[in-house]
Amino acid sequence: MYDFIDRPVTALDNAGRFLLWAMRGWVHSAAKGNCPAHALGRAFTGFNAREVLPDFHMAMALISRRAGERIMLAPLACPRISEHEAMLLALWRDTGIGRGENVRATLAHIVPVDTVAAVSQAMSRASAAMTIAGFGIALIAPHSIED
C-alpha cells in the first residue's frame, strides 16, 4: 500500500494506470446508478481485456457492497492516488505475484470473512486474464519512489 499512497498517477506503469482508471470508473459508474460492467465494457474491449471484466466486476462489486467502511476512490482525473486506491492497487499486485495469504489477510480487514474467498478468487481470475491480455498486473508499481 505504501508503495502507492499519495503518489502521482503518472508514476504508475500502463497496467497500474489502466487498473486505477478501471477502479475509479467502476465506483463512479455505480455511484451514478449505472451498470459499471456495461460502462467499462468498451474500454476493456479496446485494450483486448474483455475477458478480465466479469471477474474484475465481481471483485469490485463484492468489495463495494460488503466492505465494513465505504471505499472512497478519487475522481477519474485526480492526479494522485488516494488511500483506498493504494490499498486496492497493493491487493491487485499481491494477487498478481501469488501472495494469496497476504491478499486474504488484508481482505479480512475489509470485507466479512465469508466474503474473503469470493473476492480473492475473482481477483485471481481477473489477474490471470489481465496477464493473458498483456497487462503485467504482477508488476504494477510506481516507476520510482521519488516524486
Image (tube, rainbow, N blue to C red):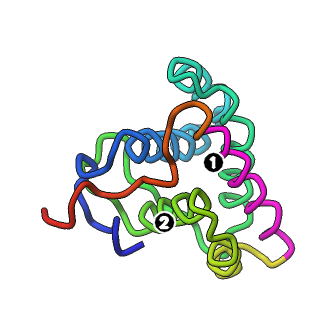
Dot 2 amino acid type: Ala
Quadrant of residue 6 within the rendered picture: bottom left
Residue at image mark 2: 90
Quadrant of residue 110 within the rendered picture: bottom right
Q: Secondary structure at mark 1?
A: helix
Q: Bin the neighbour count of mark 1 within 10 Å (Cα to Cα): few under 14, some 14-19, many 20 and up.
A: many
> Is residue 115 on the magenta stretch?
yes
Label disc, if present, on residue 127 of the rendered structure? 1
Quadrant of residue 106 within the rendered picture: bottom right
Q: Nearer the viewer, mark 1 or mark 2?
A: 1
The image position of residue 78, as x and y in percent, is 28, 48
The image position of residue 83, as x and y in percent, is 40, 69
- Please report the residue visible at 44 percent of the width from the left and 47 percent of the height from the top: 20
Q: Secondary structure at mark 2?
A: helix
| Residue furthest right as drawn | 114
In this rendering, the answer to whether 16 lies above or below 5 is above
- Please report the residue visible at 74 percent of the width from the left and 57 percent of the height from the top: 62
Q: What is the quadrant of the C terminus in the image?
A: bottom left
Residue numbers of the magenta segment: 114-130
Label disc, if present, on residue 18 of the rendered structure? none
Question: Sequence-wise, which precedes: disc 1 or disc 2?
Answer: 2
Q: Nearer the viewer, residue 65 or 41?
A: 41
The image position of residue 81, as x and y in percent, is 33, 58
Dot 1 amino acid type: Ser
